[in-house]
């Protein structure tokens, strides 16, 4: 099998820690300091990085089918991101008359990576169920 560049398997565990960091930091910032103006861009970057670690880390049963699932889910999540980039300003303009309300790049990347994680794990679960039914 031709090897595809993937992160080592322990990056899945690092991604869980990276997802917890923004939650803890923002909660402490709001509760202890009564400050809601934390650096949102930095926290979005950390969550996006965690999602990327989660999707692109290697599994023990890595094969061509999982590579195909990764490719398909990445394509679908990018299409969802493009759809959101186009439709969100239009909806803001036509429904709420907000002209200058733009989404941050971190928010868009985080949304795309979230859908990538969601679609990948859904497709992987379906593949596992199909393989179990064959046995």
Image (spheres, rainbow, N blue to C red):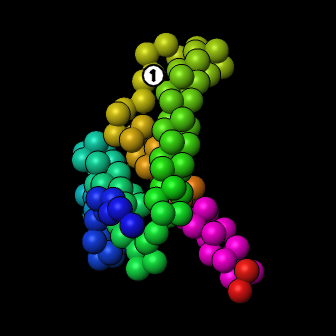
Q: Residue most toward the bottom?
A: 135
Q: Is residue 87 magenta?
A: no
Residue 55 image position (x, y, % from top left): 41, 61
**Residue toward you, 12 or 73:** 73
The stretch of residues the image draws in magenta is: 121-133
Q: Name the quadrant of the C terminus.
A: bottom right
Which quadrant: the N terminus? bottom left
Task: Write down the quadrant of residue 9 in the picture.
Answer: bottom left
Q: Secondary structure at mark 1?
A: loop
Q: What residue does disc 1 label?
A: 101
Residue at 53 percent of width and 57 percent of height: 69
Q: In the image shown, does 34 or 133 lie closer to the viewer?
A: 133
Residue at 63% over, 69% down = 127
Q: Residue furthest right?
A: 133
> In the rendered view, does 51 fall on the left or right side of 98?
left
Res 115 visible: no
Crowding at label 1, few (<14), some or many (≥20) Cα neighbours within 10 Å? few
Q: Residue furthest front?
A: 1
Q: Which secondary structure class fits the magenta region best?
A: helix
In the rendered image, the vertical position of residue 128 relative to residue 106, given as above or below? below
């Amino acid at each position: 099998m031709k090897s595809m560049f993937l992160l080592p398997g322990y990056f899945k565990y690092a991604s869980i820690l990276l997802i917890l960091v923004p939650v803890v930091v923002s909660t402490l910032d709001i509760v202890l300091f009564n400050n809601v103006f934390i650096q949102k861009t930095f926290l979005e970057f950390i969550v996006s990085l965690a999602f990327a670690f989660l999707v692109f880390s290697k599994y023990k049963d890595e094969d061509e089918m999982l590579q195909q699932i990764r490719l398909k889910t990445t394509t679908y999540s990018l299409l969802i991101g493009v759809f959101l980039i186009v439709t969100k300003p239009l909806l803001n303009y036509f429904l709420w008359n907000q002209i200058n309300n733009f989404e941050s790049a971190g928010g868009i990347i985080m949304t795309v990576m979230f859908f990538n994680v969601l679609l990948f794990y859904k497709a992987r679960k379906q593949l596992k169920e199909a393989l179990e039914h064959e046995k």
